[in-house]
Image (cartoon, coloured by chain):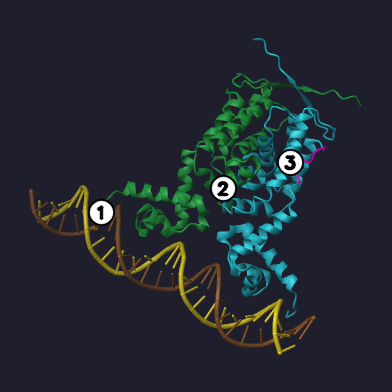
Chain colours: A green, B cyan, C yellow, D brown
DNA sequence: CGAAGGTAACTAAACAGTTACTCACCGATG
DNA sequence: CATCGGTGAGTAACTGTTTAGTTACCTTCG
């Protein structure tokens, strides 16, 4: 019991804090509860992270580190990417809830450094659009926002997802359904999907000529 | 000052509580702060609502009451409905944040009674699909979930919206952009949009015949 | 006059953060 | 090569404040 292990202690605190923060948010989280769950003296928590807010920031940092969104690399079929994204994000555990708490708790920093990643994703979409692979009349940044929402919204709002679809987003069947739907929608948006991995019926966009 | 007015007092408390809860959530909210903002003695708050949780429930109830989502009535073009929904929800003030807090705070009741409204919306979509107005290969409940997400996601995650699009979702320009995008996407999903209200180029979905 | 509306001051618990201490490790010094 | 001392890891008990919820007491209307 009296073994010393700074790294282990730190990791234990972070793990317990992740659970606590994801479950009840920074305001609802109790420092004593985190310390107890980590099997660590509360003082250690302040030793390593300074304060409750510092701990929350550290947890967010650590989660953002390992949660590479990797949205929309060029050269891969959109429907495939979307289906993958649904699967990956659904399996990512409590980090999504953490992002929601962070978004609500209005920490102005942290979002800025990720802007570069989004910038790249938008560029990839623009590229695909000029190459004629994606519906060109859709605004590229709006499209990215919508696609991110498509993937994350059900995970962020499990209750709403249950109310509408009858299943929790963590449910295996729900993941199958959602990734399938995401792929189908991707096929609608992709004008000329590169790889026909989906056996679903696929469509092309043709202008409607209306008589005035 | 010493005028008596129970209804007024109740309303004042609810209004102040809405602000507070929307801003910092149920855990972060301070009863004293709500009472002070309402210009009311804290005791009155307990008189009318019993407890902090009771007050939160009452606020949510009241907001859900007046926030009729009215998603997807049959007979109106999808693109129009979506654009409207974006405008309405964006103008709806703090209620969306409240919904997010409520979703995170895992109050199992409250979601159940709204299930009927979602049921109707899904039926409307199904109807439109069998009538050949909406892409039939998309699962109806998944489609509803996605469309709700399309409207609400940017509002629920303002920071993310800023990072991707450069604008806050409450920004007038952002509302214009998002409603325009929603309409365009609606046109993609609607096989045969009824009313051509959008001056944007519009498209029909035609199957791609692939040579095997 | 009595029930509902309203007030001020109080309380018991919970909470973030601290104090004051011990213990183990490790490199430097005699 | 022992031992000394400093530093970082760890503990238990405490503190000052904040907070949800209460008590005991007025006031006004029907």
Question: Furthest-right residue in view?
Answer: A212
Task: State left or right for residue A24 relative to residue B177.
Answer: left
Q: Residues within 10 Å of mark 1 (few under 14, many from 20)?
A: few
Q: Quadrant of the C terminus of chain A?
A: top right
Which is nearer the eye, D26 or A195?
Answer: D26
Numbered range of the magenta stretch: B70-75
Can residue B126 be seen here?
yes
In the rendered structure, the residue with mark 2 lies on which chain?
A
A27 w.r.t. A131: above or below: below
> For residue B38, what is the image quadrant?
bottom right
Q: Which residue is mark 3?
A: B121
Seen as rendered, the residue at the extreme top is B212
The residue at the point 63 percent across, 31 percent down is A181
Task: Report which residue position mark 2 lands on.
Answer: A100
The image position of residue B117, as x and y in percent, is 72, 46
Left/right placement of residue D23 relative to residue B129 reads left
């Amino acid at each position: 019991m009296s073994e010393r292990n700074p790294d282990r202690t730190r990791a234990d605190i972070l793990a317990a804090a992740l659970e606590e923060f994801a479950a009840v948010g920074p305001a609802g989280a109790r420092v004593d509860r985190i310390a107890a769950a980590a099997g660590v003296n509360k003082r250690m928590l302040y030793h390593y992270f300074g304060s409750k807010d510092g701990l929350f920031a550290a947890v967010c940092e650590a989660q953002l580190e390992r949660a590479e969104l990797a949205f929309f690399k060029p050269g891969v079929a959109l429907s495939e990417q979307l289906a993958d994204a649904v699967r990956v994000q659904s399996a990512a555990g409590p980090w999504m809830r953490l992002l929601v708490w962070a978004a609500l708790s209005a920490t102005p920093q942290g979002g800025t450094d990720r802007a570069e990643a989004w910038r790249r994703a938008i560029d990839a979409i623009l590229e695909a659009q000029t190459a004629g692979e994606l519906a060109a009349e859709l605004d590229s940044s709006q499209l990215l926002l919508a696609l991110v929402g498509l993937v994350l919204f059900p995970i962020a709002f499990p209750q709403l997802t249950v109310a509408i679809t009858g299943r929790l987003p963590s449910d295996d069947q729900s993941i199958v359904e959602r990734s399938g739907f995401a792929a189908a929608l991707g096929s609608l948006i992709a004008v000329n999907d590169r790889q026909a991995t989906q056996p679903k019926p696929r469509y092309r966009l043709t202008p409607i000529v209306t008589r005035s």
